[in-house]
Structure formats: C-alpha cells, structure tokens
C-alpha cells in the first residue's frame, strides 16, 4: 500500500534553491533535516525535496493544482522573473495547464480545474 510520496529536484546552490522554492510556495520549508536539503509538504503526505546537486535533465514536469493559473503565472513572472509561459486547454481535458522551469532546468507546471465545483470537491477530498 502506498500512503505517501516524495519528489526531489536538485539545485546547484541550496540557498538560492531554497529561496526560489520558498517564493514559489509562499512559505518557508516544513523540514530542513541537514545542510543541502529542504522539504515542503505540499499537501498531506506529498513532499517536495529540494537537494543541492546536479539537476537531472529531461524530467518532469511536476505540476501543482492551483485555483487561478493566470494569477499564479503573473506572480511568478513578477516575483521569480520566470519567462511568461503559455497556458493551454483542450475540449476533452478538464483542466488548463502551463509549464515553466526553475533556474536549474527542473520543469514545473500548474493546472487549474475548469469546473470550479469539481475543483472544490477535489480540494475537499484531499484536505480531509
């Protein structure tokens, strides 16, 4: 039985990486077990580990659900100086999505439910 998950990205400089991800998540890490490592619990049982090291190539994207993809994109362009990224949608897909990269090349993305009732139900299920 799987009951938790972690995903790890690597950054060349842990201080820069921690600051970048701290801005992305609007909060400090939940756990710093040792030098060169920081962790955020994104939702209960789902952790992102940021570790100092050589970034992997061609992995991801790791996507996060948000309620306002356009607003989050504007915030990241302003606060993290990322390039403006395209937001996509398709009739047969229940979300719109976009992908960008951190300064180390790790691919990250956001998605937003088009059906706000479904979004609220999903959030309610996850946050129990």
Image: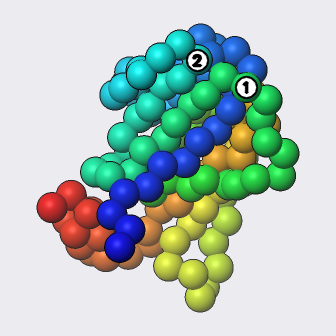
Q: Nearer the viewer, residue 114 or 25?
A: 25
User: Mark 2 sits on what residue?
Assistant: 36
Residue 124 appears left or right of 74: left
- Pointer 1 or 2: first along the chain: 2
In the figure, 45 relative to 118: above or below?
A: above
> The N terminus lies in which quarter of the figure?
bottom left
Q: Quadrant of residue 106?
A: top right
Q: Residue at x 64, y 38 (%)?
A: 9
Percent across and percent down for residue 77 are: 64, 31
Residue 101 seen in this snapshot: no
Q: Residue at x 41, y 34 (%)?
A: 40
Q: Residue at x 36, y 26 (%)?
A: 31
Percent across and percent down for residue 120 are: 25, 67
Percent across and percent down for residue 82 are: 70, 31
User: Mark 1 sits on what residue?
Assistant: 53
Residue 102 seen in this snapshot: yes
Secondary structure of the residue carrying numbered label 2: loop
| Labelled pair 1, 2 in contact (Cβ < 8 Å) | yes
> The C terminus lies in which quarter of the figure?
bottom left
Residue closest to the far left: 128
Percent across and percent down for residue 111 are: 53, 60
Secondary structure of the residue carrying numbered label 1: loop
């Amino acid at each position: 039985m799987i009951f938790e998950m972690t995903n790890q990205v690597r950054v060349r400089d842990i201080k820069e990486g921690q600051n970048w991800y701290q801005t992305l998540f609007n909060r400090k890490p939940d756990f710093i077990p040792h030098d060169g490592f920081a962790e955020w619990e994104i939702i209960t049982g789902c952790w992102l580990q940021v570790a100092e090291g050589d970034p992997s190539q061609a992995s991801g994207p790791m996507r996060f659900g948000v309620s306002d993809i356009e607003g989050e994109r504007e915030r990241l362009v302003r606060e993290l100086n990322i390039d403006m990224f395209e937001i996509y949608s398709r009739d047969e897909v229940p979300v719109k999505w976009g992908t960008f990269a951190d300064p180390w090349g790790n691919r990250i993305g956001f998605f937003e439910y088009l059906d706000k009732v479904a979004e609220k139900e999903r959030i309610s299920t996850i946050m129990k």
